[in-house]
Image (cartoon, rainbow, N blue to C red):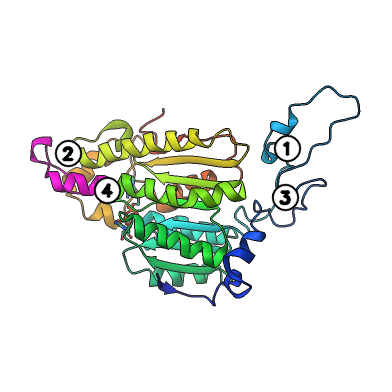
Amino acid sequence: MLPAAAASEPPAAARSGGAAAASRGAARPQPAGAERPAGAAPSGRARVEAPPGAPMLRLGRLAAHVLRPAPAAGGRFDGQVCVVTGAARGIGLAIALRLAKEGAKAVCIFDLGDGSDAIAALKTAAPAIEAVCMNVELTSESAVSGAVAEVLRSFGRVDVLVCAAGVTGKTNVKTHEVDTADFSKVFDINVKALFLCAKAVLPSMLASGYGRIVNIASISGKEGNAGMLAYSASKAAVIGLTKVIGKDYVNMGKDITVNCVAPAVVRTAMVDAMPPEQVKYMTDKIPMSRTGSVDEVAATVCFAASPECSFTTGFCFDASGGRTVY
Ligand SMILES: NC(=O)c1ccc[n+]([C@@H]2O[C@H](COP(=O)([O-])OP(=O)(O)OC[C@H]3O[C@@H](n4cnc5c(N)ncnc54)[C@H](O)[C@@H]3O)[C@@H](O)[C@H]2O)c1
């Protein structure tokens, strides 16, 4: 599959022998300036020497990330390869930009929309970045696996996956008025696509020993917004799916965490396309009496996507102006 828009030379990994060469260097990303700890294995796992005569230590069972020194100051995503779905615009784009500004080596956007403005913005924010926008129908397993294979061929691994693509379907309708085909479409894009993306990137994360997955849920998935049956139920499913994927990889000696973020209303093209009554209903429920910004959501997402988020998995972070405090 060819990128729909790209603003870079062929990736360094591809120029120097492709995925195989890149994956040889695919150990857990090191923060800028951080030395590999003495005794660390090339895979990024620390080798822990037991003191002579010590009783058998359980340290060997601890993953390297538990034992490694705190990261040195620098970009939180230095050298990392990031995939962000739905980042041609809106919240996904704000997340992609923050990943770029904080040092990502590559940001790959999977979106059906035109990504040329997003790529230009990424190149402005971080001129050295490898930025590509791939035209991917996220509900298609072959399209998703093909796009991830392309990323792996070019860059060798995926460190971060953020699933931001989503749709509301028709809103401001009672349950008996919900069109069944619309309901299925919302679930395909908001839920099935997240499963397909996680399924496609996890083998790379397991091989490198490191990975962060962040799904964008919604406050409606916790609260259930009247008039939004398909959307609210699909976002509840995102929260459930995130819990399961987080727990699936929690105790494998790998530094892989999987979380989601639940924003309240953020003024984007998605919200602008909704009936004003529905937007008012949702906004009136926000205790801060304002909508959120894409940058506020990106800040929460990028913590969950960073190496700092190493002791939280399967969790749903809140970005709701105080609407849900659980
Ligand atoms: N904006 C809000 O108020 C709000 C609140 C809570 C949660 N969210 C969630 O945040 C995420 C981003 O929302 P946004 O407001 O930025 O939306 P948006 O509509 O501005 O952007 C969504 C992007 O996803 C892409 N997309 C949709 N379906 C796709 C598909 N099948 N394949 C590939 N790409 C597809 C679109 O082309 C678009 O670029 C969504 O998951 C949304 O549900 C948004």
**Residue that badge 3 annotates:** 72
* Comes first in the chain, label 1 or label 3: 1
Image x and y of residue 97, in percent: 49, 60
3 and 4 marks in contact (CB < 8 Å) = no
Residue bounds of the magenta highlight: 167-188
> How far apart are labels 3 and 2 at the CA level?
48 Å
Q: Report the front residue among 286 and 98.
A: 98
On the question of residue 219 being in view, the answer is: no
Could you tell me which residue is drawn at 78 percent across and 53 percent down? 35
Q: Secondary structure at mark 2?
A: loop
**Amino acid at the residue labelled 4:** Asp
Any atom of ligand 1 within 8 Å of the CB at mark 3? Answer: no
Identify residue for label 2. Answer: 227
Give the mark, 3 or 2, whose residue is nearer the N terminus: 3
Report whether 76 appears left or right of 184: right
Magenta stretch holds residue 181 = yes
Asked whether disc 1 touches disc 3, contact meaning CB atoms under 8 Å apart, the reply is no
